[in-house]
Image: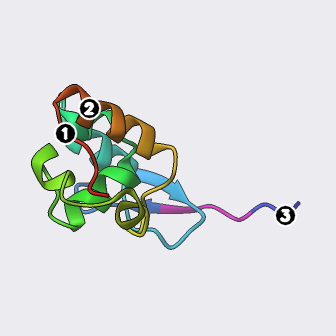
Amino acid sequence: MTTSEKNLRICEKGHKYFKSSDCPTCPTCEQERRPANGFLSMLSAPARRALENNEITSLQELSTYSEKEILQFHGMGPASIPKLRFVLKENGLSFRN
């Protein structure tokens, strides 16, 4: 197995971090942006951004999509679906069939 070389980067806010990919996301900024509560707070940063980038910020908006459609979003992985299914059910909602 080969390891990727990590490069030092500095974000617009001056945070220093190392990345081996082309992803421009600063981990410190992303942690600061994480909501303290609500359904988006229980997701990983890539999954949260996937929903936000598709303008899904409420459970009502989420319920208008099928699981298959949500999984098509860049950054959304299968591990997030059970969490989303659970929180939808808790609120009397579900994914669209």
Q: Main secondary structure of the magenta part?
A: loop
- Tag 2's secondary structure? helix
- In 3D space, how far apart are the residues under numbered discs 3 and 2 (Cα atoms)? 43 Å
**Quarter of the view holding residue 83:** top left
Q: CA distance from mark 3 to mark 1?
A: 45 Å
Coloration mode:
rainbow
Under tag 3, what secondary structure? loop
Percent position of residue 70, x then y: 35, 61
Q: Name the residue located 45 percent from the left edge and 68 percent from the top edge.
A: 23
Between 22 and 16, the one nearer to me in the picture: 22
CB of mark 2 within 8 Å of CB of mark 1? yes
Residue, disc 1: 93
Placement of 74 over or under 51, stated as above or below: below
**Of marks 3 and 2, which one's residue comes earlier in the chain?**
3
In the image, residue 91 lies at what x, y percent?
A: 16, 30
Characterize the local packing of mark 1: few (<14), some (14-19) or many (20 or more) Cα atoms within 10 angstroms. some
Residue at numbered disc 2? 89
Q: Is residue 6 within the magenta segment?
A: yes
